[in-house]
Amino acid sequence: MANPNPPPTITLTPREEQLKTLLLSAAKFIDNHDLATSPPPRDPLVLRWAGGWVRDKLLGTPSHDIDTAINAMTGEAFVDRLRDYCDVPAHRDRHGLLPDDVGRLHTVPRNPDKSKHLATSTIRLCGLDVDFVNLRRETYTEESRNPVVEFGTAEEDALRRDASVNALFYNLGTDQVEDFVGGLADLEAGLIRTPLEPLQTFLDDPLRVLRLVRFASRLGFRIDGEAERVMGDERVLGNLKVKISRERIGVELEKMMKGKRPVESLRLLDRLGLYHAVFTDPERANMPRPDTATWRTAYECLEQLEANKTPGSIYDLLVTSEEARYYAWSLATLTPWEQLPDDPPVKPGKAALPLPTQAAREGFKAPNKLCDVITAAHRHRPSILGFRDMVRENRPGVNERDRFGMAIREWDARGGNWRLQVLFAILVDVQEQIGASKGGASAQEAVLAQWQRLLDHLVELDVMDAPTIKRLVDGKILAKALGVNPGRWTGPALEVALAWQFRNPGVEDPTGAIEEVRRRREELGIN
């Protein structure tokens, strides 16, 4: 009688097939040398492709990164021997290897303090990025936050993984998918489940909480109910704060925000109560905790805006690149912090770093460029709101092109990405106005209509590219025209000249700008 559930098969691409044949031949070559010694020093080599590559192939998703698990040799030792094998011209010819088909070896060292428990060797082969590491088992003890790592079996290696769908193997020798923990059934069911008991799994390595969130959102799977119930356990969250490096948290969060479904990640972080373990400064004893009750309104709003990319829409005008999209979703994680007052000044005249910037810099090690945008978005929000109100209420000065153009240049000069600063103001405004009142879709549309009106006005004034406008005059031209030496007056005078440019779009003759500076000579302190 035929098996009603035959094991799945994996169809390799030509490059994957080339890589598989190369690795099997190299393993046989190494075995023939090593096992000829007496007594044999180890078992014959068995190579398996593991984890995400297997999962994605079964889902029909292309994958260019391959993790190779080795039963009886470290990854670094195997790659050293593999390179020796590839150095033989006859072997290269046999496998059709071109000069660029065997790259340089790169080993990421073991770093237990950052939950990196085993060295991984990486090399580019046959156009694919391939990691090599030995099968292992991990044993955690109460005395140490770092596990004891030893060579293990394929089943032991599968059991230590974060999710069953990431614990599948493709055995290169048998051409079979191996499933030791029920990953195939979970893949079919769209389920994210831990191979071992969830609470102990998360206590052993709390980063698995974020990894499960990322995989669930990326794949569109649901997280097993038993796992969900303990992901927000205070013991788990406490360990996440102190046991895992913030850099590794940042890596997981970046992958979420750059993925296809960032909103799903934020929904899970919100619903599972993970916010305060991620977006915080774990080293600061008195770090505030913002109320996240209305946070959902902000990130759901961004999801709605992203769904409408028609020309001239809010998203189309404000999010102009993939990097900007990543920054936009990162900003959406920080809107709850805007409800809290700033820290006292560090010293007279020096403002403290804004709380949302602290949460990003220390919580997930946001890069400096993103931190600058966060700081600017926080500090310029009152000014941005003022211009929104000016347009909404048709106040005096609403048609002064220089007023808007110079403001945009200032926002951009003090943090960059002025468009994202405006987007942040929009998300906070929606969170404050709609979240607190629990207003519906029509109320949110009314709020967004006010912001669309502001952006339409900026387009009409032709100031969207204000930060890149080319000046008609520089300091030397002004000094020569006025017959004085450059000095403290130069910077303010250049701003006066630029404002004149905004009032006179299309004029290329600098005479008018120079005359404007000359007219205001006394005001500018030009002697």
Image (tube, rainbow, N blue to C red):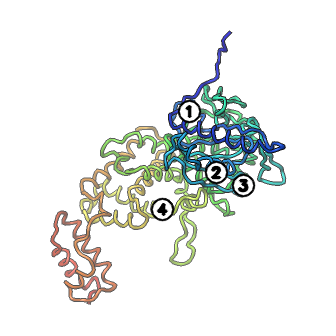
The mark that comes first in sequence, 4 or 1, is 1
Q: Nearer the viewer, residue 21 or 268?
A: 21
Label 4: how many Cα within 10 Å (few below 14, some 14–19, many 20+): few
Residue type beneath disc 1: Lys
The mark that comes first in sequence, 2 or 4, is 2
Decide: marks 1, 3 in contact (CB < 8 A)? no
User: Element under label 3?
Assistant: helix
User: Element under label 2?
Assistant: strand
Q: Residue beneath label 2, please? A: 121
Q: Residue beneath label 3, please? A: 243
The mark that comes first in sequence, 3 or 2, is 2
From the viewer's perspective, is the residue at label 2 or at label 1 nearer?
A: 2
Decide: marks 4, 3 in contact (CB < 8 A)? no
From the viewer's perspective, is the residue at label 3 or at label 2 nearer?
A: 2
The mark that comes first in sequence, 4 or 3, is 3
User: Element under label 1?
Assistant: helix
Instruction: Report how far apart the C-alphas of labels 3 and 2 lie in the structure.
Output: 25 Å
Q: Residue beneath label 1, please? A: 57
User: Element under label 4?
Assistant: helix
Q: Which residue is pictured at 43% across the width and 49% down the height?
A: 322
Instruction: Report how far apart the C-alphas of labels 2 and 4 lie in the structure.
Output: 31 Å
Q: Residue beneath label 4, please? A: 369
